[in-house]
């Protein structure tokens, strides 16, 4: 056990003088998760930053599982290579699928699929036919990609970081958090199971849908099960939009964003409340700790992307988002990383309440 813990410290960089530890909270958002890939790619280059825990959902869960496995078997460089290989496998797997950007989409560079010949039919079909009818064999191409990318037995045996993936229990409506010792392709797919696209994932007799409905991502495991009090939220879904949506696709997109941000905003409201009680001396003792919240996002960019682009796994688009993620992480490291361990760099009241 001591050797395993030492290997984990070497992989993550924790335990060294001058190294600051953080926890990561990774949102889901389909192909937009490539933005988080770029963020993680840059953070892994930073020797002065260590990762204690990761809580994630949906596409964030895939990033988290790949990152944890890469760190476990190959350290920081192994994690970067694993993430790169995973997203390229995603693009490769979709090459011969029906959902491809049209020449018109490519010409205008909007990265959507709205003028794709297959997308309108696909969109309409998912609204009237369930995946139990349209996909009775329950084929999910992501399963092969995950199993080609991760040795789940090794990840369960010795994860370099604390790992928490959220899924939504279909029967109870409660969040289920899978820890590193429970990692499997099913657990990751459960966290990313959009009910209009895939059949619910069954694990130990229970059925699960996408974790974004109840925790996108769940922050409480990082509060209760990690020593570090700094949480870096990597946002995928825009919180604020200046304009009221008026078209059907715009309305649907905004409903999706609000739904998948709601659980995170509720948790941030609770964290803000507890922080105020601690700061005012009302709560004392070791059971409660002051949480420091940080955020890396690209709201202006994400606001311009329609919901259809979340299904666009064209490599050019994924690399575009990856580059934006790297740039935003670089900016955060330059301007806010110094405050880690000292104070929150997010105004919780302004951003979440």
Image (tube, rainbow, N blue to C red):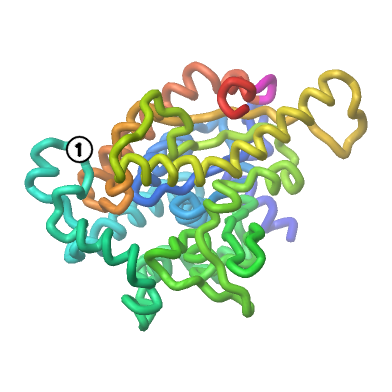
Residue for point 62% across, 35% down:
231
Quarter of the figure with the N terminus: bottom right
Residue at the extreme bottom: 137
Q: Which image quadrant is residue 112 in?
A: top left
Q: Residue at x 66, y 65 (%)?
A: 172
Q: Residue at x 35, y 32 (%)?
A: 303
- In the image shown, does 309 or 242 lie closer to the viewer? 242
Task: Tell me, yes or no, whether the highlighted magenta stretch contains residue 4.
Answer: no
Q: Which residue is mark 1?
A: 110
Locate residue 301: give its quadrant.
Answer: top left
In the displayed structure image, the side of residue 146 where residue 335 appears, left or right = right
Relative to 221, residue 140 above or below: below
Left or right: residue 193 compared with residue 86 = right
SS for dot 1: loop
Magenta highlight range: 341-345
Occupied quadrant, residue 287: top right
Query: Which class describes the residues within 10 Å of circle 1: few (<14), some (14-19), or many (20+)?
Result: some
Q: Can see residue 154? A: no
Q: Is residue 38 left or right of residue 222?
A: left
Q: Quadrant of the C terminus?
A: top right
Q: Does residue 222 show up? A: yes
- Which residue is more in the foreground, 264 or 18? 264
Picture coordinates of residue 162, whole percent (x, y): 64, 51
Q: Main secondary structure of the magenta part?
A: loop
| Residue 186 in picture, x, y percent from top left | 51, 70
Task: Please provide percent x and percent y for residue 224.
Answer: 76, 46
The question of residue 343 being in magenta is answered with yes
User: Which residue is located at x 58 percent, y 65 percent?
Assistant: 183
Q: 61 left or right of 251?
A: right
Across and down, in percent, residue 33 comes to 40, 46
């Amino acid at each position: 056990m001591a050797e395993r813990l030492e290997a984990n410290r070497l992989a993550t960089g924790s335990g060294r003088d001058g190294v600051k530890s953080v926890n990561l909270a990774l949102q889901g958002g389909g192909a937009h998760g490539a933005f988080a890939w770029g963020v993680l790619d840059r953070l892994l280059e930073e020797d002065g930053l260590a990762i204690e825990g990761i809580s994630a959902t949906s596409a964030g869960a895939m990033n988290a599982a790949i990152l944890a496995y890469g760190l476990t078997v190959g350290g920081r460089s192994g994690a970067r290579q694993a993430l790169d290989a995973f997203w390229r496998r995603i693009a490769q797997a979709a090459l011969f699928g029906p959902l491809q950007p049209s020449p018109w989409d490519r010409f205008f560079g909007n990265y959507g699929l709205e003028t794709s010949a297959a997308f309108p039919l696909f969109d309409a079909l998912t609204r009237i036919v369930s995946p139990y009818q349209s996909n009775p064999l329950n084929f999910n191409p992501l399963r092969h990609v995950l199993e080609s990318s991760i040795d789940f037995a090794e990840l369960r045996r010795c994860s370099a970081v604390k790992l928490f993936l959220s899924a939504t229990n279909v029967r109870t409506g409660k969040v289920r958090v899978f820890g590193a010792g429970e990692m499997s392709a099913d657990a990751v797919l459960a966290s990313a199971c959009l009910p209009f696209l895939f059949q619910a994932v069954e694990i130990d007799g229970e059925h699960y849908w996408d974790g974004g409905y109840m925790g996108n991502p769940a922050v409480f495991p990082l509060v209760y099960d990690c020593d570090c009090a700094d949480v870096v939220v990597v946002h995928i879904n825009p919180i604020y939009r200046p304009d009221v949506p008026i078209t059907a696709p715009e309305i649907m997109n905004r409903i999706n964003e609000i739904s998948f941000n709601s659980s995170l905003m509720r948790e941030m409201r609770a964290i803000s409340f507890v922080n105020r009680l601690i700061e005012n001396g009302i709560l004392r003792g070791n059971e409660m700790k002051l949480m420091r919240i940080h955020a890396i996002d690209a709201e202006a960019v994400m606001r311009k992307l329609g919901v259809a682009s979340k299904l666009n796994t064209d490599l050019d688009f994924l690399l575009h988002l990856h580059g934006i993620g790297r740039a935003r992480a670089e900016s955060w490291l330059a301007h806010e990383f110094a405050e880690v361990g000292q104070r929150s760099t997010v105004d919780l009241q302004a951003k979440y309440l």
